[in-house]
Amino acid sequence: MVATAVDDILKQAVREKTGLRVAFVDGMPASHAARALQVSETEGAEGLWINLPDADEATISRFARTLPKVGFTLTIGKLRYGFDAKVISRNPRFWFNDTVMMDALLVTLPDDVRELQDRRQPRLPVSEGSGITAQLFRLDKSAAVSGSPTAANLVPVEAKLQDLSLTGGGFLCAPDRSLMSARRGERLACIVEFRGMKILLVASLARVTNISNRAVRLGVDFDAHKNERAMAGKLEQLANVVQELERQDALRRR
């Protein structure tokens, strides 16, 4: 993607307050909601100013101290992008406008922004403080044949929920040979937890993306199973979770 297109995408993210996300730090999976504040073209301070609204002081200080390489995902409408950058500096008194001051990090401008995939529905970021978690499972042979998973048939996958919609979700995990060779469409299960409620969803593997030598992204699809008996009433429950994520995302955009 040419430099002008990269610049246009980043400036659109700033204008629309689009949900930016830290997906990994120095090659390790991470999960931090972020906001693009300003594309700086000042000589000697070129870069993208970002804010981590849900991160605590210790996390922001660690970013400023170690100046890590950071992998971002960015959703604009139904398009999803990924890019890499490096933290340059911190300004705890960054003036976002004439009245609002923020704690901000300056990261390098990316050389390239990758389009990851189209979305039937925009995926909403799931932050550490969202109150929403999920566990992904592969099915043992008996469940894979019957197509009706029970707790005894589920084999947990060590993965962390990154984003969610009514049609699917994204997880980050460490590289695993069996996952990397898994076939697209493999039947999975996903338990989403929110406010004491556990929603067992039937899913299938949509894609496996190697982000770095330490992180793999798994995309899963719920929509293909929406008419199955095992999903009866589940998407209505999931809609309550998505509505909460929409509320949190709207607050971050203010």
Image: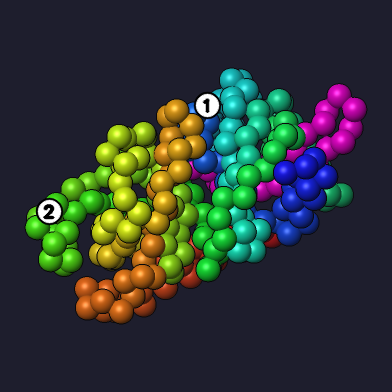
Q: Is residue 227 visible?
A: yes
Where disc 1 sits, the SS reads loop
- Extreme right residue here? 43
N-term-proximal mark, 2 vs 1: 1
Quadrant of residue 234 within the rendered picture: bottom left
Q: Position of residue 204 (x, y in %)?
A: 32, 60
Amino acid type for the residue under numbered disc 1: Asp
Looking at the image, residue 123 lies above or below residue 94? below
Amino acid type for the residue under numbered disc 2: Lys
Front residue (pair 17, 229):
229
**Label annotation for residue 100:** none
What residue is shown at x 67% (from left), y 43% (from top)?
Answer: 113
What residue is shown at x 39% (from left), y 70% (from top)?
Answer: 223
Q: Which residues are magenta?
A: 31-54
Q: Is residue 237 visible?
A: no
Front residue (pair 239, 52):
239
Which residue is label 1 attached to? 26
Q: Is residue 196 left or right of residue 217?
A: left
**Label annotation for residue 141:** 2
